[in-house]
Image (cartoon, rainbow, N blue to C red):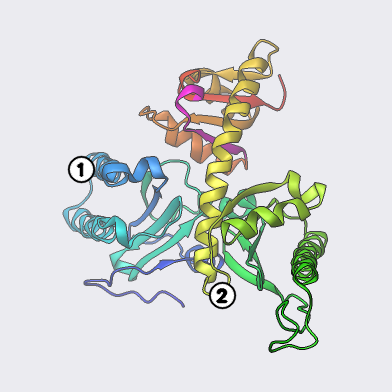
C-alpha cells in the first residue's frame, strides 16, 4: 500500500510476519525529502528480553539520538520525539511482542509511516534517523537466514513448511496410508481383525511408512531448492521416532526440534518456532567461529581490535565481521552498517566465553 502524506496521531503498528518483501518494496520507494524517518532494529533474543533489557537498551539509544540531534529545528525535533514515543509505547508490553529474535520498526509522522516486521535476527539494537529508511539489515535478513524446511508431525498427520525471513509457507500435507480394520479382537467391530501381535506389527509398519513419506517429501523439496536446514516439530515421542528416518544429508542439517501440534499450528507459530531454533543453533556455531578467528590472527588472516578491524573494513579486506554483542563503542554501529553495505557477513558474539576473547570488533580477511 503506497504511503500517503498526512500529519497527526498514527495507529499502533501491527507486528507483521511474512511481509518483509512487501515492506522493503514500500520503503524503497521513499525518496529523500523534508521528513525525517526513524529506522529501529530491536534485539529481542531471550537475553535481551530478560527483565526488560530490550526496552532499557532502546531508551538508551533514543537518549543518544536526541542528544546528537539537538541542533535540529524545534518542529523537526518534536515530530521525531512523537515518533520515538510511539515506538516505545508499541514495544513496552513484552507479552504483545512477536516470539522472534528481532524486530524492525520504521516511523515517520509526516509520511504517515509506522510499520514493523518480525525478523529472524537483529545484530544489535540500533536507532537511525535519516531522510531515508535504512534497509540494509532488512534486505540482508533473507540472504543470511536462507530457507528452512520445518516438518510438523504426529502419528496421523504431517505438514511441511518452507520458512524464510519473509514468513512460513505450507508446501505439502503428508497423509499416512492407514490400513482399514478393527483392533486385535477378531470378534469385535472390525472382523476379520488381527491377533494382538499382528495388530501392533501393522501399527508399527504404518507409522514407519508415514515417517518415510515425510522424509521423501523433505528430500523432494530440498532438491527443488536446497535448504539451509531442517526442523522437526510435534509431540516429543513422534519427533524422536521420526529422526532416525532422516537421510544423512538432512540429518546433518538438522537445526533442532520443537513441540507443535500439526492440526492446530499456524504459519506464524511455525515461523516463530523456527526463528528461535535457528537463533539457538547460531549461538552454538559462533563459538567455533571465534576459535577460527583467534587461530587465524597469527597467520595474518584475521584481525582483533577496533582500529585494526575498522582499517580492514575500509580497505574491503573483511570477509566476516565479528562484533561483541555487549560493546558500547561508537564504532560498532558504523562497522555493522559498513559491513552490510559491502555484503560482508556479520556475526554477533553473544556467548560470554567467546566474547571475552574479542576486543570489541574482529574480522576474518579476504586477503592480507
Q: Is residue 291 above or below residue 209?
A: above
Local secondary structure at mark 2: loop
Q: Nearer the viewer, residue 6 or 217?
A: 217
Which residue is depicted at the point 26% across and 59% down?
83
Residue that lies at the very extreme toward the front in this rendered image: 187
- Left or right of 42 on screen, residue 146: right
Image quadrant where one finds the C terminus: top right
> Percent from the top left, x then y, of residue 10?
26, 71
- Measure the alpha-carbon separation of dots 2 and 1: 55 Å
Name the residue that disc number 2 marks.
263
Q: Nearer the viewer, residue 275 or 80?
A: 275
Q: Is residue 163 magenta?
A: no
Q: Do we see residue 23 in this rendering?
A: no
Q: Do we see residue 262 in this rendering?
A: yes
Magenta region, residue range: 344-354
Write down the quadrant of residue 63 in the picture: top left
Write down the quadrant of residue 104 in the picture: bottom left
> Percent from the top left, x then y, of residue 177?
78, 77
| Pointer 2 local density, CA inside 10 Å: few below 14, some 14–19, many at least 20 | few
> Percent from the top left, x then y, of residue 295?
66, 15
| Pointer 1 local density, CA inside 10 Å: few below 14, some 14–19, many at least 20 | few
Q: Is residue 51 above or below residue 192?
A: above
Q: Nearer the viewer, residue 78 or 240?
A: 240
Name the residue that disc number 1 marks.
70
Q: Is residue 74 above or below residue 24?
A: above
Which residue is depicted at the point 75% across and 51% down?
244
Local secondary structure at mark 1: loop
Amino acid at each position: 500500500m503506497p504511503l500517503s502524506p498526512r500529519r497527526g496521531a498514527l495507529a499502533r503498528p501491527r507486528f507483521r510476519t511474512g511481509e518483509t518483501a512487501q515492506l522493503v518494496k514500500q520503503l524503497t520507494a521513499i525518496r529523500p525529502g523534508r521528513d525525517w524517518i526513524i529506522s529501529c532494529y530491536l534485539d529481542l533474543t531471550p537475553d535481551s528480553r530478560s527483565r526488560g533489557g530490550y526496552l532499557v537498551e532502546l531508551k538508551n539509544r533514543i537518549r543518544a539520538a536526541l542528544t546528537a540531534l539537538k541542533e535540529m529545528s524545534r518542529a523537526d525535533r518534536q515530530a521525531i520525539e512523537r515518533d520515538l514515543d510511539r515506538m516505545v509505547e508499541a514495544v513496552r508490553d513484552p507479552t504483545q511482542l512477536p516470539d522472534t529474535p528481532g524486530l524492525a520498526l520504521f516511523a515517520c509522522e509526516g509520511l504517515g509511516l509506522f510499520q514493523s516486521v518480525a525478523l529472524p535476527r537483529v545484530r544489535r539494537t540500533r536507532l537511525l534517523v535519516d531522510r531515508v529508511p535504512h534497509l540494509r539489515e532488512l534486505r540482508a535478513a533473507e540472504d543470511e537466514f536462507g530457507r528452512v524446511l520445518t516438518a510438523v508431525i504426529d502419528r496421523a498427520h504431517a505438514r511441511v513448511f518452507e520458512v524464510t525471513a519473509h514468513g512460513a509457507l505450507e508446501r505439502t500435507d503428508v497423509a499416512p496410508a492407514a490400513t482399514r480394520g478393527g483392533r486385535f479382537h477378531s470378534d469385535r467391530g472390525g472382523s476379520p481383525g488381527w491377533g494382538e501381535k499382528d495388530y501392533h506389527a501393522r501399527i508399527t509398519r504404518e507409522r514407519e511408512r508415514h515417517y518415510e513419506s515425510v522424509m521423501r517429501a523433505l528430500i523432494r523439496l530440498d532438491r527443488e531448492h536446497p535448504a539451509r536446514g531442517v526442523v522437526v516439530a510435534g509431540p516429543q515421542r513422534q519427533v524422536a521416532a521420526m529422526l532416525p528416518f532422516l537421510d544423512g544429508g538432512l540429518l546433518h542439517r538438522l537445526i533442532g526440534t520443537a513441540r507443535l501440534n500439526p492440526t492446530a499450528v499456524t504459519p506464524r507459530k511455525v515461523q516463530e518456532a523456527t526463528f528461535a531454533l535457528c537463533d539457538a543453533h547460531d549461538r552454538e556455531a559462533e563459538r567455533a567461529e571465534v576459535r577460527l578467528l583467534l587461530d587465524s590472527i597469527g597467520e595474518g588472516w584475521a584481525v582483533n581490535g577496533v582500529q585494526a578491524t575498522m582499517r580492514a573494513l575500509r580497505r574491503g579486506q573483511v570477509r566476516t565481521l565479528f562484533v561483541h554483542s555487549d560493546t558500547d563503542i561508537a564504532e560498532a554501529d558504523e562497522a555493522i552498517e559498513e559491513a552490510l553495505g559491502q555484503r560482508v557477513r556479520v556475526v554477533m558474539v553473544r556467548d560470554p566465553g567467546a566474547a571475552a576473547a574479542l576486543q570489541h570488533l574482529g574480522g576474518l580477511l579476504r586477503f592480507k
